[in-house]
């Protein structure tokens, strides 16, 4: 039997062996664990980072209107806007030899005279739609006082004429032309009614003409009637 001292020495040596063996095993395990954390190229594998999603910016495209779109904007509803104003509409008195509307209105003067006076001063006087008109340098004007029984006029002022047409015939042609262009929605009456004058004014504004709201030389020319 071993003595107590011998047993103590034996156990001490066994403990040292166990500690040495455990240390060797621990040292051997460290490279394996580190190798598992390395990437295939031998560099440490970086932890995956979640890439933040970039917000897509909305791109605003400002389209330029084409010629047809610009044309529609310039017009009034379904009305067509002129591409070119006839030259005679810009200076009708130069081409036709007739005074402008403002000059015709100044010459008209709204004067009232008897039948004899009218016959002495004007050679052409006609009865149209309940009223007498006299012709003066391209315009028909009411002949107030020529016959008190026939003094009905839709409009008290000059009405431009062409081609030896009477006032109602000129107005009817203007109504028809404006109707085709979408400015006038009434009937072809030959009367210078409120609706007709409004249509004429809208057309004159769109064409860049002087807005008189009546049948003048520039408007008739712009409509292509002369």
Image (cartoon, rainbow, N blue to C red):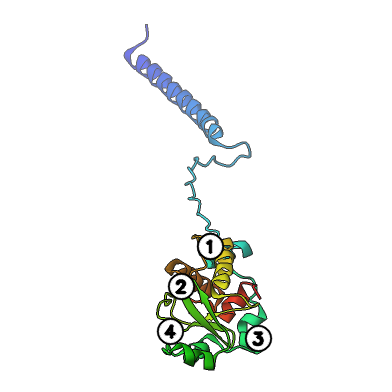
Q: Horizontal placement of 142 versus 95: left or right?
A: left
Q: How far apart are labels 4 and 1 at the CA level?
A: 26 Å
Q: Earlier in the sequence, mark 2 or mark 3?
A: 3
Point out residue 58 in the picture as x, y percentages from the top left corner.
50, 54
Q: Quadrant of the C terminus?
A: bottom right
**Which mark identifies residue 144?**
4
At 46% from the left and 28% from the top, the residue drawn is: 23
- Residue 14, compared with residue 71, is above or below; it is above
For marks 4 and 3 on the same chain, the one whose residue lies earlier in the sequence: 3
Where disc 2 sits, the SS reads loop
Residue 96: mark: 3
* Left or right of residue 161: residue 200: left
In the image, residue 49 lies at what x, y percent?
48, 43
Q: Which residue is mark 1?
A: 188
Q: Does label 2 or label 1 sit earlier along the sequence? A: 2
Structural crowding at the residue carrying mark 2, measured as other residues with C-alpha within 10 Å and reported as few (<14), some (14–19) or many (≥20): few
Q: Residues within 10 Å of mark 1 (few under 14, many from 20)?
A: some
Query: Residue 73 location in percent, x, y?
Result: 53, 65
Q: Is residue 1 left or right of residue 68?
A: left
Within 10 angstroms of label 4, few (less than 14), some, or many (20 or more) residues?
Answer: many
Q: Is mark 2 in CB contact (under 8 Å) with mark 1?
A: no
User: Gap between marks 1 and 3, in whole Å?
Assistant: 26 Å
For label 4, the SS is: loop
Q: Residues within 10 Å of mark 3 (few under 14, many from 20)?
A: few
Q: Secondary structure at mark 1?
A: loop
The numbered mark, 4 or 1, whose residue comes first in the sequence reads 4
In the rendered structure, which disc, 1 or 3, sits on the residue that comes first in sequence?
Answer: 3
Residue found at x 48% / y 92% = 117
């Amino acid at each position: 039997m071993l003595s107590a001292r011998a047993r103590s020495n034996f156990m001490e040596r066994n403990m040292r062996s166990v500690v040495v063996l455990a240390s060797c095993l621990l040292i051997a395990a460290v490279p394996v664990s580190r190798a598992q954390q390395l990437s295939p190229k031998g560099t440490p594998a970086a932890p995956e980072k979640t890439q933040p999603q970039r917000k897509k910016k909305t791109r605003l495209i400002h389209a330029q209107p084409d010629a047809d779109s610009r044309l529609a904007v310039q017009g009034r509803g379904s009305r067509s806007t002129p591409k070119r104003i006839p030259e005679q509409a810009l200076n009708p008195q130069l081409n036709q030899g007739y005074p402008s509307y403002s000059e015709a209105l100044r010459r008209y003067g709204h004067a009232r005279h008897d039948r004899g006076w009218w016959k002495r001063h004007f050679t052409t006087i006609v009865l149209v739609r309940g009223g007498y008109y006299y012709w003066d340098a391209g315009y028909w004007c009411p002949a107030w006082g020529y016959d008190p029984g026939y003094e009905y006029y839709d409009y008290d002022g000059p009405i431009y004429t062409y081609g030896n047409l009477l006032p109602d015939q000129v107005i009817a042609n203007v109504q028809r032309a404006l109707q085709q262009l979408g400015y006038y929605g009434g009937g072809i009456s030959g009367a210078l009614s409120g609706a007709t004058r409004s249509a004429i004014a809208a057309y004159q504004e769109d064409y860049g003409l002087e807005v008189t709201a009546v049948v003048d030389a520039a408007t008739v020319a712009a409509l292509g009637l002369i």
